[in-house]
Image (cartoon, rainbow, N blue to C red):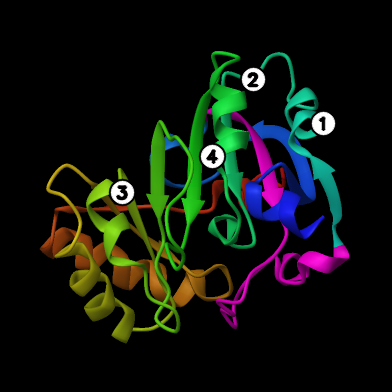
Amino acid sequence: MNLALKKGEVLPLMESFYTLQGEGNFTGVAAYFIRLGGCDVGCHWCDVKESWDAGKHTILPIEKIVDGIDSKANKVVITGGEPLLWNLTPLTQMIREKGIAVHLETSGAYPLTGEWDWICLSPKKNKLPTDNIYKKADELKMIIYNKDDFLFAEKIASKVSENCKLYLQPEWSRVSKMAPQIVNYILANNKWNLSLQSHKYIDIP
């Protein structure tokens, strides 16, 4: 089993579902989400802490994961947890062979594997991204919990490519406090865009 995990032939699947992308560049777009178990980044405000322990989730052959993709889906988002804990090349190749675009949501804390149509990088202070992912990110999504996070966001933004789309997103438990500050910040620094967790407002997965 450990060798199969290392090769990316099997993966710990926490959940999968077909819904609308709730945040970032593809807000409102239909996508099939594959949430993999396992994460050691340890964000105190994480809203899927149940994903952290990979051992609590079913290890499935990637063929079974791909077979579960909704037939209507033309985009798959691989998220976590931290999906780059695993070798994602076999899974992403298999999905793309079906003519489906594959998107990644990651903190970037581990080496990049997989073949991607879109990479959303959302770095965390306590486990920074590996150097090789910054220039490959199509989208940078910075979670704003307090005022210091604006400085962190600017530091990370200086490392991504000039074509990378930049988003500031209030941490959900502090939306009422931080959203007005984000709005004012974007008005003064209009390279940034606002991202909101719209799926939480309309109560969808």
Camera-near label (3 vs 4) is 4
Q: Please tell me which residue lies in front, 44 or 3.
A: 3
For marks 3 and 2, give the one nearer the viewer.
Answer: 3
Residue, disc 2? 73
What percent of the width, then of the height, locates residue 153? Answer: 27, 71
The quadrant of the image that shows the N terminus is bottom right
Residue at screen point 54% across, 13% down:
99
Boundaries of the magenta span: 29-56
The mark lying in front, picked from 1 and 4, is 4
x then y, percent, for residue 135: 22, 51
List x then y, in percent, for residue 88. 57, 44
Q: How far apart are marks 3 and 4 (CA)?
A: 17 Å
The part of the image, by quadrant, that contains residue 80 is bottom right
Name the residue tied to disc 4. 89
Q: Which residue lies under the disc numbered 1? A: 64
Amino acid residing under circle 1: Lys
Q: Distance between the residues labelled 1 and 3?
A: 28 Å
Callout 4 amino acid: Thr
Q: Quadrant of residue 68?
A: top right
Which quadrant of the rendered structure holds the C terminus? top right
**Dot 3 or dot 2, earlier in sequence:** 2
Q: How far apart are labels 3 and 2 at the CA level?
A: 23 Å
**x then y, percent, for residue 124:** 43, 74
Q: Residue 137 carries which label?
A: 3
| Separation of marks 2 and 1 at Cα, in angstroms | 16 Å
Q: Nearer the viewer, residue 168 or 2?
A: 2
Q: Which of marks 2 and 4 is nearer the N terminus?
A: 2
User: Secondary structure beneath disc 2?
Assistant: loop
